[in-house]
Image (cartoon, rainbow, N blue to C red):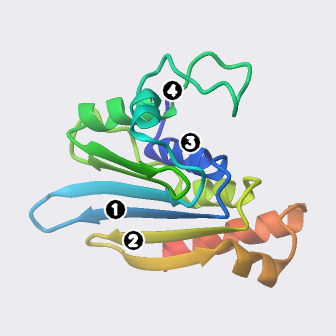
Amino acid sequence: MHWTLADLVADITQNGIESGASQVDLSVSELRDDTGKAEFRFTVSDNGKGMNADELEKAKDPFFTDGVKHPLRKIGLGVPFLIQTAEQSGGGTEVKSEPGKGTTVTAWFDLNNIDTPPVGDIPGMFRSVLLFQGPGEIVLRRICRDSKRNLDYTVRKSEIVDAIGSLEDAGSLALLGQYLQGLEEE
């Protein structure tokens, strides 16, 4: 099981990255209004291999795995855990896919529901996602609107690499972490 919503986001994003995509887009939003309504929503879109209707239905089954991506696994729990967690917390999911064009997964959660996991470490999750091997480009978008913050920023992996160099040494990773944390504090 996933401890936080950030864990769920990372898991679903990794699916997109492992789909053979050249680009993966991740959007994460937290919106809280004056009436007390609070929602966490994320969307992962990739331009990978995609799935037909039958494969898409099987992806929702926890006892199915294609056996290709992870040859030793006998089950695939990412999407089923996402669906279960979203539904039990007063939210929902939508998965769209087309062979050869990619997949888009959207999930939303009622942050006031007692069954909703905590949001977790969004900057830490973004850093992990940027370190996944795979697509040439990863685009992250973050929106957070509440009484304390009004954030809206976009981070592109290519721009990060251009600015700080390789994401494989400790200094670059520390700098990346500080940068992402700073974006959350503005």
Residue located 60% across and 60% down the image: 126
Report the label total: 4
Residue located 52% across and 57% down the image: 122
Using the image, tell me which numbered label, if any, was put on residue 78.
none
Q: Which residue is mark 4?
A: 77
Query: For the residues marked 2 and 3, what is the alpha-carbon distance in whole angstroms?
Result: 20 Å
Give the side of residue 183 with respect to residue 39, left or right.
Answer: right
Residue nearest the viewer, comparing 102 with 182: 102
Query: For the residues marked 4 and 2, what is the alpha-carbon distance in whole angstroms?
Result: 27 Å
Q: Which residue is mark 2?
A: 143
The percent position of residue 179, horizontal first and vertical second, equals 66, 74
Amino acid bearing label 2:
Ile
Query: For the residues marked 4 and 3, what is the alpha-carbon distance in whole angstroms?
Result: 10 Å
The percent position of residue 33, horizontal first and vertical second, equals 17, 67
Badge 3 local density, few (<14 within 10 Å), some, or many (20+)?
Answer: many
Q: Which residue is mark 1?
A: 30
Amino acid bearing label 4:
Leu
Residue nearest the viewer, comparing 2 with 87: 87
Q: Are marks 1 and 2 in contact (CB under 8 Å)?
A: yes
Considering only order in the chain, which callout, 1 or 4, is on the residue closer to the N terminus?
1
Amino acid bearing label 3:
Asp
